[in-house]
Amino acid sequence: MSIEPPVPGEPRRPSGPRDSGDAWVVAPSGDRYWGRFGAAGLLAFDAARDSVLLQHRVSWSHFGGTWALPGGARHEGESAMDAALREALEEAGVPARSIRPRATSVLDLDIWSYTTVVGDVVEPFEPVISDPESHALEWVRVDEVLDHPLHPSFEDSWGHLRTTLALRPVIVVDAANVVGSVPDGWWKDRPGATDRLLDRLDALAKVGVPGTALELPGDRWFPRVVVVVEGEARAVGDRDDPVSVVRAEGSGDDAIVDVATELDGAGAVVTVVTSDVGLSHRVKRAGATVHGSGWLLDLLS
């Protein structure tokens, strides 16, 4: 097994056979972009520290001496999400279980793309320099990021990436209304029909929701989903984050208004899914955006 010698200017000094994605893409202008299949990086945000994880790049790397995100070239067939988490593990020892994706932002240059995965720290960790590409890894307070000499591309994107850190979308689902909008025999087995809806919401939570659907910047978002159930449907089982179930003790509408009001007060960007006109007016007064059940069913299809 041969080992390739270091090449000045490459993002990583190879220590073994190069992956097929580890190559420059050269634009007609002569500009070079690392990653034959594109590249991806992780913007890990720790709310408890009000800080993001940054990497001080070694001098021999591309734009060496600057600060940027852990990241690198995607492998062939690898998703941007998987690439960002893999690179963060390889370069900074970031455990995947510690990150909950919040959003993705894509720079698409047609010949090449870079995807930033914005992720919330849900299990605290300390970064570890685990390859030769870093001088240092530091938690940098959000207000102090611009005090560092940044990689030009990260500096260009920091403004809109910082905006995403203040946006925490939550979708609140009126389960009875959504289930009742599809004549699939739900009246014979309301818990079963609601469970099927929850299964589909679990799948949606994994792939995310287009930013345009939520009227938010960025490519895709991975919102929390709160499903309010009432009556017989309260027999459904619990779900794992990011999908949760709220069982209305009385009126389902009242419970939805209470949930929306609490989330809005906590600073979340709340979208309520219901086609009930009266409920729509109530949750709008609580600060939520409203979409009918068809909006959600389109996302689930």
Image (cartoon, helix red, strand yellow):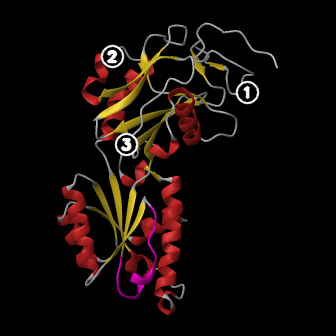
Say whether marks 2 and 3 touch (CB < 8 Å): no
Say which element carries label 2: loop
CA separation, marks 1 and 2?
A: 33 Å
Say whether marks 1 and 2 touch (CB < 8 Å): no
Nearer mark to the viewer, of 2 and 3: 2
x 42%, y 37%: residue: 125
Say whether marks 3 and 1 touch (CB < 8 Å): no
The N terminus is located in which quarter?
top right
Name the one closer to the observer, 13 or 282: 13
Q: Is residue 222 above or below residue 148?
A: below
Say which element carries label 3: loop
Name the one closer to the observer, 86 or 197: 86
Relative to 266, 56 lies left or right = right
Ranked by sequence position, the earlier of labels 3 and 1 is 1
Residue receiving disc 3: 217
Residue receiving disc 2: 148
User: x, y (%) of residue 288?
Assistant: 25, 61
Q: Is residue 200 above or below residue 76?
A: below
> Does the magenta run of residues contain 108?
no
Residue receiving disc 1: 20
CA separation, marks 2 and 3?
A: 25 Å
Ranked by sequence position, the earlier of labels 2 and 3 is 2
Q: Start and end of the magenta stretch? A: 229-240
Confirm whether residue 252 shows in the render: yes
Ranked by sequence position, the earlier of labels 1 and 2 is 1
- Amino acid found under the numbered disc labelled 3: Pro
Relative to 88, 211 lies left or right = left
- Amino acid found under the numbered disc labelled 2: His
User: x, y (%) of residue 287?
Assistant: 20, 60
Relative to 195, 155 lies left or right = left
x 38%, y 57%: residue: 224
Q: Residue 131 appears in which quarter of the rendering?
A: top right
